[in-house]
Image: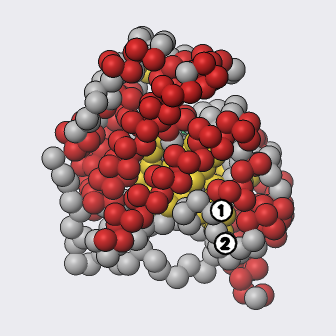
Amino acid sequence: MTVTYCAPKEESHPCVYLPHVPVWCMRQAGRYLTEFREFRAGKDFFETCQSPEACCELTLQPLRRFGFDAAIIFSDILVIPQALGMDVQMVAGKGPTFPEPLKEPEDLQRLTAKVDVGKELGYVFKAITLTRHKIEGKVPLIGFSGAPWTLMSYMIEGGGSNTHSKAKRWLYRHPEASHMLLTMLTDVIVEYLLGQVAAGAQALQVFESHAGILGPVHFNEYSLPYLRDIARRVKDELKEAGQDVPMIVFAKDAHYAVEDLSQSHYDVVGLDWTIDPQSARERTGGKVSLQGNMDPCALYAPKERISDIVKKMLEGFGTRGYIANLGHGVYPDMDPENVGAFVEAVHQHSKQMIKKI
Ligand code: 1CP
């Protein structure tokens, strides 16, 4: 099954000129919004993900409140392990849970060898097409996927983990099987991202949320080659069809890798808050755009303080080749007003900075 987005005639081009630095937030659709909690109440998380209408509504909720310059489709990175045949449940108070995680290399045989991405994940494509229409060209719609290592770690750990020791055990004990699993995931991710673009996604973000636990040596062996392969294959395939879509890579806690990431076929490198904006600029040498990186916890500060922090961040990154964001997602206990203050501060300070150029 393929879903192809056909733009309505009146839709404006997404690459519009903005008088300010664009801003969006990871997890901008989330539990910090009362309307999100009300909508999700009593509904199963993954059933919600499978409803295009629900995903569309949840994607649009933050846009109604704040002046975000992009939408990110409501879904989850764990729909890929589900497409590979694994059972994943969202347990209240615990987070995502795999009742039968992968334990040993033989367990790879349990995974679907050739995933029919259109059939298994067509509901995400439908959600993207519906949402793209509903946005009416006001802001671009971002599609996303988890990166291979992050998905592998969930599939082996069976849920969130502090040490990721079960998944890292595979890297030390079963390097071949690890590469096999990462390759399987990469193949599905490439097709999944291309399907999202066909359905109407105007940018793509790849989340390597568990990069930090790897360290430089393992990152170079088990993460970076797959991240590169994903961007290269998606870009090559799109190029053949005369298309291009900006791609963002977000490898959390992998500041040691920013140079490599800036040369890995992605257009934008997303940064967490543990790296200084100016040094990120120096290390990436203007080769890519940067995204990030305010500490999400700065949203607990009073609004005036948020404005000062944003100003410093903008001065560090500069206004060109830059997308403002947090260094990770919005937390459920955050005050929506402060999220609004963050967005306003980015717009206001960057407008003034651009005027001075
Ligand atoms: O019931 C709920 O609403 C649960 C909270 C929630 C939400 C709002 C989860 C469970 N997933 C989501 C949506 C989601 N997940 C989005 C939506 C778009 C948006 O950003 O607004 C996105 C992009 C994700 C991606 C995602 N899921 C990541 C990568 C980003 C990151 O946070 O590093 C990861 C690691 C997940 C797994 C996941 N899903 C949900 C939780 C609580 C977790 C993390 C669990 C853990 O390992 O601690």
Q: Are marks 2 and 1 in contact (CB under 8 Å)?
A: yes
Is residue 69 rendered to the left or right of residue 293?
A: left
The residue nearer to you, when weighing 180 against 291, is: 180
Q: Residues within 10 Å of mark 1 (few under 14, many from 20)?
A: many
The image shows residue 99 at horizontal and vertical percentages of 42, 11
- Give me the C-alpha separation between circle 2 and circle 1: 7 Å
Label for residue 250?
none
Dot 1 corresponds to which residue?
Answer: 262
In the rendered image, the residue lying farthest to the left is 1
For the point 60% across and 18% down, the residue is 173
The image shows residue 25 at horizontal and vertical percentages of 59, 52
The residue nearer to you, when weighing 61 against 310, is: 310
For the point 50% across and 61% down, the residue is 247
- Does label 2 or label 1 sit earlier along the sequence? 1
Is residue 279 rendered to the left or right of residue 347?
A: right
Query: Which quadrant of the rendered structure holds the C terminus?
Result: bottom right
* Amino acid type at image mark 2: Lys
Q: Compared to 24, does 46 lie above or below?
A: above
The residue nearer to you, when weighing 267 against 34, is: 267
Is residue 116 rendered to the left or right of residue 228?
A: left
Visible residue check, residue 107: yes
Dot 2 corresponds to which residue?
Answer: 287
